[in-house]
Image: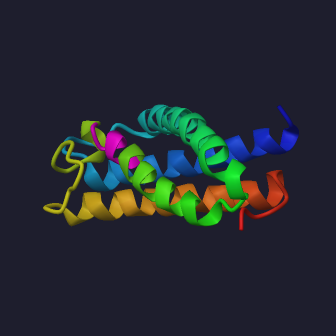
Amino acid sequence: MSLKFAAYAIIKFILYFIWCYIGIRCLARRPPTGRWRAASLGVFRLMIGVGFGALLGGFLHFGHGARNGNYSGLYFAVLVPARWLEWSIMSFFPDLSAQGFWLFPFRDMRTLLWRLGGILISFATDIIAFVFVISRLIC
């Protein structure tokens, strides 16, 4: 594992930790459980991303990219719903959902906004990876 990739993983974890902590503070149905809970949820979110990334990365590379080399359109078409599912899985934890797990939390604007913010954070860390780790964008 390269030093750049390790730095990327640490940055991703820190951002997930912060976002989970914000989620706990804003969405918890019970009193906030603090930084250790946010750290464990950040690690769990990172592992969900690794699992989905391995599955979808193979699909993107071998299924589509191997044919024409253009990943950008398919990247967003596949990853936006995948990221929604990843952050929806995170809302299964009572600390991170004001209403419990729902794939489409349209009754609770706070949970909806938290998931959308998580998706933005996920894509922001991908941009960091593409620019600093891979040294190019996927376009």
Tally of numbered discs? 0
Task: Tell whether 51 sits left or right of 81.
Answer: right
- Based on the picture, tell me whether residue 90 belongs to the magenta stretch: yes
- Based on the picture, tell me whether residue 125 belongs to the magenta stretch: no
Q: Is residue 94 above or below residue 81?
A: above
Name which residue lies at 40% across and 39% down: 34
**Near-viewer residue (29 or 117):** 117
Residue 44 horizontal/vertical position (percent): 48, 32
- Name the image quarter holding the C terminus: bottom right
**Near-viewer residue (14 or 87):** 87
Give the image's coloring scheme: rainbow
Q: Is residue 127 above or below residue 84?
A: below
Name which residue lies at 32% across and 46% down: 88
Residue 77 horizontal/vertical position (percent): 48, 61
Residue 31 horizontal/vertical position (percent): 24, 42
Q: Main secondary structure of the magenta part?
A: helix
Q: Quadrant of residue 22?
A: bottom left
Residue 130 horizontal/vertical position (percent): 75, 58
**Near-viewer residue (71 or 41):** 71
Looking at this view, name the residue that lies furthest to the front: 67
Stretch of the chain drawn in magenta: 87-92
**Near-viewer residue (18 or 59):** 59
Name which residue lies at 58% across and 35% down: 50
Q: Is residue 73 above or below residue 87?
A: below
Q: Quadrant of residue 108?
A: bottom left
Name which residue lies at 18% across and 43% down: 100
- Name the image quarter holding the N terminus: top right
Task: Tell whether 74 sits left or right of 86.
Answer: right
